[in-house]
Amino acid sequence: MSVSVFWFLPTHGDGHYLGTAEGARPFDHAYLQQVAQAADRLGFGGVLIPTGRSCEDAWLVAASLIPVTQRLRFLVALRPGVISPTQAARQAATLDRLSNGRALFNLVTGGDPEELAGDGVFLDHRERYAESAEFTRVWRRVLEGETVDYEGKHVHVRGARLMFKPVQQPRPPLWFGGSSEPAQDLAAEQVDVYLTWGEPPALVKEKIEQVRAKAAAQGRKVRFGIRLHVIVRETNEEAWQAADKLIANVDDATIAKAQSAFQRTDSVGQQRMAALHGGRRDKLEISPNLWAGVGLVRSGAGTALVGDAPTVAARMKEYEALGIETFILSGYPHLEEAYRVGELLFPHLDLAIPQIPQPRVVQAHGEAVANDFTPEKKPRGPEEITMTRLRQSFSAALVPWLLPVLLVVVWQVASQTGWLSSRILPAPEKIVTTFWQLAVSGELWQHLAISSWRALLGFSIGGSLGLVLGLITGTSRLGERLLDTSLQMLRNVPHLALIPLVILWFGIDESAKIFLVALGTLFPIYLNTYHGIRNVDRGLVEMARSYGLSGWSLFVQVILPGALPSIMVGVRFALGLMWLTLIVAETISANAGIGYLAMNAREFLQTDVVMVAIILYALLGKLADVSALLLERVWLRWHPAYQRQEKTA
């Protein structure tokens, strides 16, 4: 089973050590952006944003980081008692739309009576969970599109509804963590993902079984996640040294002060965390590779997995076997540790790879009427929809040919009225007649077949060489140094200048013509392959390497697909140059082919035949371009830009 790994945004501060200002790191939006973008590139499924008076506001932080990330999801706190469920639902839907479906929500009831009183919440532990249950019932139903009337002990709404739906349907997932019985009852009834702090596997198993049983009794299924710190290094010895270093500046007075603050909380989860170490430094490894040193001075998650990558991965798989699907990890400092986890640990895990959300089509509805409802479009029947689609398809097919048809009409009129002499340019009618005579006699098809054979064979040879050379110079610095300068010089030599040498090398038979076509088509594909590879997003390559991809698998799954749009542009250019080069090639003692047909007609002043040859080149070039476009649609159907083209076509 694949697991998802989240990271943590340190909106309450960051540094190299716990319990001291020494080694502390100034954190601002630029630093949080660095951490978020690192998590995004490395392949973390999302980030948990903490909440409380010691933290920056989670909603504003998430909203500010949406534009600078691509796939990262944001787990943001919902605070019952501090905001109404209807307003919270509107904010949740907005954040989900702004992020294109990357918003997740973490229900936080709070556990510190002193902090809660500062927020205006004066309920005891059990009453807070009763309020949270009422809050969540309304919040979920409003997000799912219902108009809600609800009257409870703590929440009372009438006609609560949402005008603008979230992207995720029926609503964004709701996460929650709590260890008390009321918390487990709430999880069983309301939430999608139940979180536990990092306790020994036996204790985690007990909590999972309790919540799973309570949910089953209500006909529901709940997924499970765990919140842990992590200290992973190349060796176990280095990891334990890093753990000791993390609390090296924590003195007994700081521990006593922190433990005293923990005692005022009524959070059962916090009490369980504190009980794991009892405020003592001598027995902090409470389970194999599970270290409670963080909890000496930090509230909330207070344990860390410590060891080399295979060891930490093995411990994570023990939790996975209990039913854990999501790991929310963190480490100090959070930027450096994100890279350590991505580079050392990820290759040992079966990760659920996050995807970049596809662009969505936003329906226009106009301004809300009377601040109460959105205007509705007049419904269209099936026949009207079918006719509209037919008109759109017909227009899309007709528009590209309007200008050529108009030019032909003007040309014909100018010829008939005598404005245009037939010696300069024969009338379209005359060209059509000549085309028909050549076609009926079979001469046209003979020339066309020979030219097509020369063009396609030359393109196959030149395109293959260009692709291979582009791959070599694009993927190898040594290959670039050896080959690129010579190829760039050769690219700028005109084909006409090479004709004497080509005749000396190959004579005047087919080899010379095919060589020139191959040479002309080599360079567009070479250049676009080279630049396509060099312009592949380094973040994608870095993330792929963190998943363990390298060598051939990295090239096939990441580099080549990333370069393919540029390569296809080169193919389109090369197909156009293929016919241009063929004209030059067929001037070398040819006795057949479209170029020969045009040159022979020139000798006898047959301008109508010359025009037939020119029009044939134009049509063949268009056919080649259409073929390349069809290949793009097949090979690049996964690419968002080409998906949009198909939808608008």
Image (cartoon, helix red, strand yellow):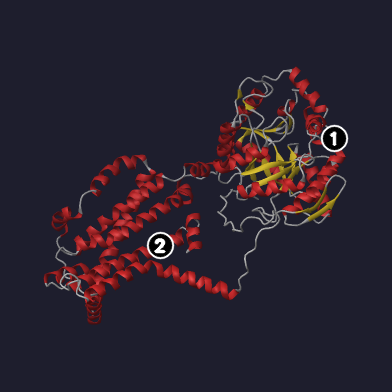
For label 1, count other residues whose C-alpha is less than 10 Å away and answer few (under 14), some (14-19) or many (20+).
Answer: some
Residue at (78% x, 32% y) in the render: 273
The answer to which quarter of the image holds residue 80 is top right
* First in sequence: mark 2 vs mark 1: 1
- Mark 2, residue position: 629
Q: Nearer the viewer, residue 348 or 101?
A: 101
Percent of width and height locating residue 267: 81, 34
Foreground disc of the pair 2, 1: 1
Percent of width and height locating residue 46: 63, 43
Percent of width and height locating residue 7: 63, 38
- Mark 1, residue position: 122
- State whether residue 342 is above or below residue 379: above
Three-letter amino acid code of the residue under disc 2: Leu
Residue at (72% x, 18% y) in the render: 251
Q: Secondary structure at mark 2?
A: helix
Residue at (85% x, 37% y) in the render: 125
Percent of width and height locating residue 364: 59, 58
Q: Residue furthest front?
A: 370
Q: Is residue 121 left or right of residue 416?
A: right
Q: Nearer the viewer, residue 280 or 611?
A: 611
The answer to which quarter of the image holds residue 272 is top right
Three-letter amino acid code of the residue under disc 1: Phe
Residue at (48% x, 49% y) in the render: 558
